[in-house]
Image (cartoon, grey):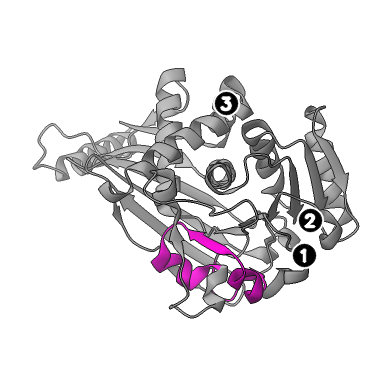
Amino acid sequence: MTRFVDVPALCRIVARVGVEEFLAGIAQTMREDFKRWESFDKCARVASHSDIGVIELMPVADAERYGFKYVNGHPSNTAKGVSTVMAFGMLADVETGYPLLLSELTLTTAFRTAAASVIAAQALAREDSRVLGIIGCGAQSEFQATAFHTMLGIEELRIFDIDEAAMKKVARHLCRFPDLNVIQATSAKEAVKGADIVTTCTADKAWATILTPDMVEPGMHINGVGGDCPGKTELHADVLRGGKIFVEYEPQTRVEGDIQQLPDSHPVHDLWRVIADEEAGRDSASQVTIFDSVGFALEDFSALSYVYKKALELNEGEDISLIPELNDPKDLFERVLGLSGQVHSRNAA
């Protein structure tokens, strides 16, 4: 049987574990998987692009489990009352190919993206970082803020969005943290002035420059989340040229990330090597570091693995017959005959 975790089941798991602990659990699983990066069979995601969005398949596997995520990105969906990002995923046993888990990944993707941002910041940002600026107050922003506050010790959050209602939404949700000072800025420049860490998480599929060189200060860590497909950027090219850039999987990020603006010869660094202590992160307190995050299949693999573990531990979700159970593995037609017989009996009655 395959364990099925739908949205209500995932919400029950999060409620029982706790939002902060759920984030931390995914982050820890992801950190451990990054440390064994070379044990995974990896490739860039397979993407089908249209003028208004993208649909993608993201596969990855180690010696024991295969995982994939189906995900879309349609920025104009909000006008239709539909999420801009929707996803589901699966884990399967490599030895037999049997599907172990079928799970929602829309909510879980928000958690995994925030978890990836935090483990990158833990590796790259200054240890004394206490102020976070977020540009873009869409679906991802509260997850980012919660992760940085509870896992990195951020004490002050400055947010900006051209949609004032979106800013108010974020401030309202973050009232649950009385020790986090949330400031609604009047511009992107005001939101990042004096910030130790800056997260850009806008949704428009456009060549945009959300962060320009005059907004960048020495020692800043930049977490570029929104630039995640061809023709979609957030960071001015000179911001990239002025910092030390870290990526998840270079072949994918060269096509989808902000570094699509730079020649392939421009050097970038693998984040996993820093997490595995194979390479240094920032070289000085004054250096600008940049995590050009596009989202990679291994991060979803980690999130699915954690969801599967918790679903079994807490007995959440349900077992479904996704694959036929056979008396004789060579006799698939038997199941069709059995169903046909049931239909015949009902019709005769």
Pointer 1 or 3: first along the chain: 3
Give the extent of the magenta segment: 229-257
Q: Image point 74% across, 46% down: which residue?
A: 132
The three-letter amino acid code for the residue at tag 1 is Met
Q: Position of residue 74 (x, y in %)?
A: 62, 64
Q: Which residue is mark 1?
A: 215
Q: Image point 55% across, 62% down: which residue?
A: 244
Q: Label 2's element?
A: helix
Q: Position of residue 281 (x, y in %)?
A: 50, 51
Q: Which residue is mark 2?
A: 192
Q: Which quarter of the picture shows residue 243? A: bottom right
Look at the numbered discs 3 and 2 and tell me whether their residues touch, using CB distance below 8 Å.
no
Would you place residue 320 above or below residue 291 in this image? Answer: above
Q: Position of residue 294 (x, y in %)?
A: 52, 60
Mark pair 3, 2: CA separation: 28 Å
Query: Is 251 colored magenta in this rendering?
Result: yes
Q: Image point 54% across, 58% down: which residue?
A: 293
Q: Which residue is mark 3?
A: 21
The 10 Å Cα crowd at callout 3, few under 14, some 14 to 19, many 20 or more, is some
Pointer 2 or 1: first along the chain: 2
Residue sitting nearer the eye, 37 or 279: 279
Mark pair 2, 1: CA separation: 7 Å
Residue sitting nearer the eye, 179 or 277: 277
Look at the numbered discs 2 and 1 and tell me whether their residues touch, using CB distance below 8 Å.
yes
| Nearest-to-viewer mark from 1 and 3 | 1
Q: Is residue 336 visible?
A: yes
The 10 Å Cα crowd at callout 1, few under 14, some 14 to 19, many 20 or more, is some
Q: Label 3's element?
A: helix
